[in-house]
């Protein structure tokens, strides 16, 4: 039997199909096989494909050609990361007895994979919407009222993003007559719409609230799944369509900085992770902004974005998984209620530390291998201020994700909680992710070479690996940064410079900066602590008032819905008639 | 259209009379079914009639595909003196749509009418239905302006009766029917006054003849006033905002079969008549026609899309949600029409066909749910997906089509409309469409969410699966919503041919 046909089908379809099947399979064992098997089949389909840059799947709808399957070196690495993440997520959620959640997780993952592997904007739009619609159930399945409302807000803004994309695509179709994916510049008509549509999904500053709003309210497994796909799909689309767009550099830099303050003062550890997700995506966006593909360092930057996305999907998933395990066992991720869990959850704690080390870019872990190219190219292209911002943000990452998450959950003051170790399937999934984090990061294991050889610009990537990555100044700079940051954390802790539940420490490579950073962080924390609730209240009141107005106007008892007594209709008819005639007369003058 | 060119579905002798048979057959049968012994027998007659009209409409479509314009002279009297039935690209789509939707609703009718209408009234009910069908067919086919008014009144009066018969189940149907009658009569009188003005200006009632004699009369106040009256009269019948207020109650309290049938056909026929007058009787290049389209119809369409989408979100009764959404959808069609280009009009006509498919399916599913339990509120739909999976699945497909999700035909018509308004430079209209897509997500999402995600309330009546015959009709419509996404050549081809037929004739038709 020949499996040739498998190379014609987008691997995302296999995953989506597995998801639909999983919904109808009510036998847990079968469902387990399907949920894990689907992404693995997808992986095989993707890896066994031999030819890049060819339209493997084409479909015609009306007068449009939809390219449903097309792989090149850029989409390959993203799809690969998505497929691995989907597999691990399936293992992680094996203990779930919820077909709807399994199905939605797979359809959502499959849609993201399919979107990264198709060749025209209209198909992208289709899967773009599918990711939105399928993922919202992962939030709703929590079952609380807050989750329901957050889900509604989430889906509304996601659909807005899709509509903007569609709108832009139609502009494009009108102007160019084709919708194939290619690098475009913002000067082209409709490009801004597409840019904004992507920007919403990438959680650009001021468009980001849906992320911190929705992700922490998702189910424990749902948050893991959500963290992997939506934003990274947007990163992929930026890398595909807007490489080297300078505005992205500044947007990315701001994205790396501003969540740091919020993450530092936030008490819900999953929300901290959501903020740090923002910050990490900022690095990738920034790298894409630098990626002028005609220059050597520009290509490094694009490689950096892709590598960072790959590594990030793994370690951010790992961190969310460890927090999910804590949530699963203790029912909370509030920092103030946790602490000392390492006694009974040693493996989870260990995996969390691996994830933390990776996200903080410790040498020997995957984050270092991935982030290094971005930093080098930003520095080389002369964006000094941006480079400093990224450095500051790196220190911030260490503080809120690298130290705060494991410290408050597993160490710190003993909460007295003695939950059981995470379920076996969770441990396996976390083990896998941790393995990838270490294998990619540890020199000599070959993981770094494997990752680099799969990057969009392979030659440049391998050159960078051999000549720049493991140079002493690189490693030592990074170590200095990390050691100083940790030292600061220890000192702060020792001298009790912050309240226990709301630690406000942001550290930098230099004492002055560190003090400044600390000042800014506490100030921002204070401001946020006071302004936040007030603002939230204001919004709520405004929202309530708008809702009242709308109800007054539109509800069945509302002004506009009064059963329309015939008399008023006659008046309306006369008015419209008058309008038509007046317009005709005016037009004739 | 080409797909019809090779069809020979009837012998020549019959095919020649297809235009008139489409009107005559329902008329004759309606008289006959007064004497039907029981409701079931009358239903059989109605089913036969609608199947016959489907056949005849396909015959007509193939004739038009071969010959272009078909002109049928009543009693052998040649127009402009005699009355002419005229079929061209524009009304073939409408004729096929009305007859097909009549057939589908007739399938739905048997269980629904048996439950909702008193036994002794059932034969008369089907009589009214067939009169209404005849009237709508006549509106679509006639080439005579005054004749159009007559058919408009025939279909409307039958409609008032049909809506009023909902009183067995819900007394509010009586006031709804009365309001509809008053407003509908206002609309019809406006229309006939408009025709009167045209007659005064040209001295003829044949539409093609009027068009010819109007040449050079575009400065005439009489002609302009006539235009105003006709637009308002037909706009009222087509539920143009703000003249839509008769619609929500009429749709909500009518028997569910009537709602299915009307939502898919009645406003569509009026919309067609409006397009016919604007594009073929008047000239869409005349200043005052352009001005009316740009400054009255297009804003009214946008307001309809936004206001009624909002209103749909806040309704408690499912039928009213769908009814307000219908007004919003009429807004889409009007928007397409008011663009005034081939792309715009064809997008409007395409959406008209798609909307009939989706709204028909939606109202069918809602009617089926209410068949056993007589529940209509949104909150009554809680947990319906568990107990009536096939009905709700059909509802879901149509609902996705209404939202304009890819893989359903609703997506294509929204895309065409986007395209048409963007090419015309009406970015504000595109914004309106985009906004309403999100609003549609909310009003439809509310229903889906109740059906799929919520548990039924304690003591709420259980919702049962629909009878086979309803499921069949429902799934044919839902299936078409999906099928036409992959192969839209039939409705799109007809819509484009229609738009080209009327706009190609009037000097390019581009503003």
Image (cartoon, grey):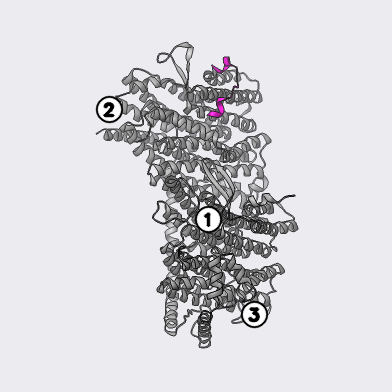
Whole-Å distance between the Cαs marked 1 and 2?
53 Å
The residue labelled by disc 1 is: A155
The residue labelled by disc 3 is: A416
In the picture, measured across the screen, residue A98 lies left or right of residue B445, that is right
Tell me the mark number nearer the camera, choosing from 1 and 2: 2
The kind of secondary structure element at disc 1 is helix
The kind of secondary structure element at disc 2 is loop
Q: Position of residue B240 (x, y in %)?
A: 42, 36
Q: What's drawn in magenta, residue-wise?
A: B1-16
Query: Is A350 inside the magenta-drawn segment?
Result: no
- Asked if residue A353 can be seen in this view, the reply is yes
Return the residue nearer the eye: A34 or A76.
A76
- Residue B208, by quadrant, is top left
The residue labelled by disc 2 is: B219
Q: Earlier in the sequence, mark 1 or mark 3?
A: 1
The answer to whether the residue labelled 2 contacts the one labelled 3, judged by CB atoms less than 8 Å apart, is no
- Asked if residue B274 can be seen in this view, the reply is no
Whole-Å distance between the Cαs marked 1 and 3?
39 Å
Return the residue nearer the eye: A414 or A204.
A204
Q: Chain of mark 2?
A: B
């Amino acid at each position: 039997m020949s499996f040739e046909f498998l190379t014609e089908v987008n691997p995302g379809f296999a995953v989506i199909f597995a998801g639909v099947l999983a919904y109808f399979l009510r036998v847990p064992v079968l469902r387990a096989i399907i949920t894990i098997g689907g992404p693995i089949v997808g992986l095989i389909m993707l890896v066994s494909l031999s030819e890049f840059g060819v339209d493997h799947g084409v479909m015609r709808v009306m007068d449009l050609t939809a390219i449903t399957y097309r792989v090149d070196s850029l989409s390959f690495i993203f799809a690969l990361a998505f497929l691995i993440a989907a597999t691990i997520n399936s293992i992680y959620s094996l203990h779930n007895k919820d077909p709807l959640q399994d199905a939605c997780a797979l359809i959502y993952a499959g849609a993201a994979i399919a979107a990264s592997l198709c060749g025209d904007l209209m198909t992208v739009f289709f899967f773009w919407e599918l990711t939105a619609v399928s993922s919202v159930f992962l939030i709703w399945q929590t079952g609380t009222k807050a989750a329901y409302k957050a889900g509604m807000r989430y889906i509304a803004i996601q659909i807005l993003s899709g509509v903007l994309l569609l709108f832009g695509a139609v502009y494009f179709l009108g102007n160019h007559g084709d919708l194939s994916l290619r690098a475009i510049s913002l000067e082209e008509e409709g490009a801004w719409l597409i840019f904004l549509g992507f920007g919403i999904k990438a959680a650009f500053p001021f468009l980001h609230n849906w992320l911190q709003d929705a992700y922490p309210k998702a189910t424990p497994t749902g948050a893991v799944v959500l963290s992997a796909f939506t934003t990274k799909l947007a990163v992929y689309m930026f890398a595909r369509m807007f490489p080297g767009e300078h505005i992205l550099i500044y947007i990315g830099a701001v994205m790396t900085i501003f969540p740091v303050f919020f993450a530092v003062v936030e008490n819900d550890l999953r929300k901290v992770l959501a903020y740090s997700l923002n910050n990490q995506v900022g690095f990738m966006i920034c790298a894409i902004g630098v990626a002028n593909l005609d220059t050597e360092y520009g290509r490094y930057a694009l490689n950096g974005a892709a590598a960072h996305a790959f590594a990030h999907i793994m370690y951010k998933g790992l961190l969310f998984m460890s927090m999910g395990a804590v949530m699963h066992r203790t029912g909370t991720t509030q920092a103030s209620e946790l602490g000392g869990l390492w006694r009974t959850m040693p493996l989870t704690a260990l995996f969390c530390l691996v994830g933390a080390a990776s996200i903080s870019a410790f040498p020997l872990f995957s984050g270092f291998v991935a982030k290094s190219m971005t930093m080098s190219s930003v520095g080389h292209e002369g964006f000094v201020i941006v480079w400093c911002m990224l450095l500051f943000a790196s220190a911030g990452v260490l503080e809120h994700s690298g130290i705060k998450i494991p410290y408050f959950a597993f160490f710190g003051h003993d909460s007295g909680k003695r939950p059981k170790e995470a379920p076996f399937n969770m441990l396996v999934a976390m083990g896998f992710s941790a393995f990838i984090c270490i294998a990619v990061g540890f020199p000599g294991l070959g993981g770094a070479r494997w990752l680099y050889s799969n990057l969009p610009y392979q030659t440049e990537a391998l050159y960078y690996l051999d000549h720049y990555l493991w140079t002493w100044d690189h490693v030592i700079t990074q170590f200095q940064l990390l050691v100083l940051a940790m030292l600061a954390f220890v000192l702060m802790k020792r001298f009790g410079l912050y309240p226990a539940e709301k630690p406000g420490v942001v550290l930098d490579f230099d004492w002055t900066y560190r003090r400044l950073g600390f000042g800014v962080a506490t100030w921002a924390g204070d401001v946020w602590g006071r302004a936040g609730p007030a603002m939230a209240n204001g919004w709520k009141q405004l929202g309530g008032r708008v809702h009242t107005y709308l109800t007054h106007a539109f509800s069945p008892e509302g002004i506009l819905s009064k059963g329309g007594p015939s008399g008023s209709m006659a008046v309306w008819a006369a008015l419209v008639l008058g309008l038509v005639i007046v317009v005709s007369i005016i037009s004739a003058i | 259209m080409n797909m019809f060119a090779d069809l020979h579905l009837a012998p020549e002798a019959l095919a020649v009379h297809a235009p008139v048979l489409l009107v005559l057959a329902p008329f004759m049968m309606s008289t006959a079914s007064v004497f039907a012994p029981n409701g079931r027998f009358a239903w059989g007659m109605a089913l036969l009639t609608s199947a016959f009209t489907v056949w005849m409409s396909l015959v007509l479509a193939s004739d038009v595909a071969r010959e272009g314009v078909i002109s049928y002279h009543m009693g052998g009297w040649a127009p402009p003196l005699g009355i002419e039935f005229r079929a061209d690209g524009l009304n073939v789509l409408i004729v096929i749509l009305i007859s097909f939707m009549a057939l589908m609703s007739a399938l739905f009718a048997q269980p629904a009418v048996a439950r909702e209408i008193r036994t002794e009234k059932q034969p008369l009910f089907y009589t009214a239905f067939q009169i209404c069908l005849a009237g709508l067919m006549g509106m679509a086919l006639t080439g005579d302006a005054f004749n159009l008014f007559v058919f408009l009144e025939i279909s409307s009066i039958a409609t008032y009766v049909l809506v009023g018969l909902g009183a067995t189940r819900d007394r509010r149907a009586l006031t709804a029917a009365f309001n509809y009658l008053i407003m509908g009569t206002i609309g019809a009188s406006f229309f006939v006054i408009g025709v009167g003005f045209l007659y005064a200006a040209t001295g003829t009632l044949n539409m093609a003849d009027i068009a010819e004699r109007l040449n050079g009369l575009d400065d005439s106040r009489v002609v302009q006033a006539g235009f105003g009256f006709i637009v308002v009269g037909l706009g009222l019948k087509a539920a143009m905002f703000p003249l839509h207020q008769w619609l929500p109650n009429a749709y909500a309290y009518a028997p569910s079969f009537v709602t299915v049938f009307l939502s898919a056909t009645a406003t569509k026929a009026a919309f067609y008549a409006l397009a016919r007058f604007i594009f073929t009787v008047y000239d869409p290049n005349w200043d005052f026609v352009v001005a009316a389209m740009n400054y009255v119809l297009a804003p009214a369409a946008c307001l309809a899309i936004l206001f009624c989408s909002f209103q749909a979100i806040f309704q408690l009764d499912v039928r009213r949600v769908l009814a307000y959404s219908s007004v919003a959808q009429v807004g889409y069609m009007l928007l397409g029409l008011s663009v005034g280009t081939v792309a715009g009009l064809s997008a409007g006509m395409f959406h008209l066909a798609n909307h009939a498919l989706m709204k028909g399916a939606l109202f069918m599913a809602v009617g089926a749910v209410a068949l056993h339990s007589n529940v209509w509120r949104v909150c009554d739909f809680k947990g319906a997906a568990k107990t009536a999976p096939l009905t709700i699945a059909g509802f879901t497909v149509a609902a996705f089509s209404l939202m304009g999700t890819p893989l359903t035909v609703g997506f294509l018509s929204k895309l065409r409309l986007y395209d048409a308004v963007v090419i015309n430079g009406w970015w504000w209209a595109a914004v309106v469409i985009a906004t309403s897509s999100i609003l549609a997500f909310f009003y439809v999402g509310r229903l889906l969410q109740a059906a799929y995600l919520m548990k039924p309330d304690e003591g709420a009546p259980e919702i049962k699966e629909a009878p086979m015959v309803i499921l069949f009709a429902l799934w044919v419509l839902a299936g078409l919503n999906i099928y036409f996404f992959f192969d839209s050549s039939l409705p799109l081809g007809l819509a484009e041919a229609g738009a080209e037929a009327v706009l190609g004739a009037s000097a390019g038709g581009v503003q």
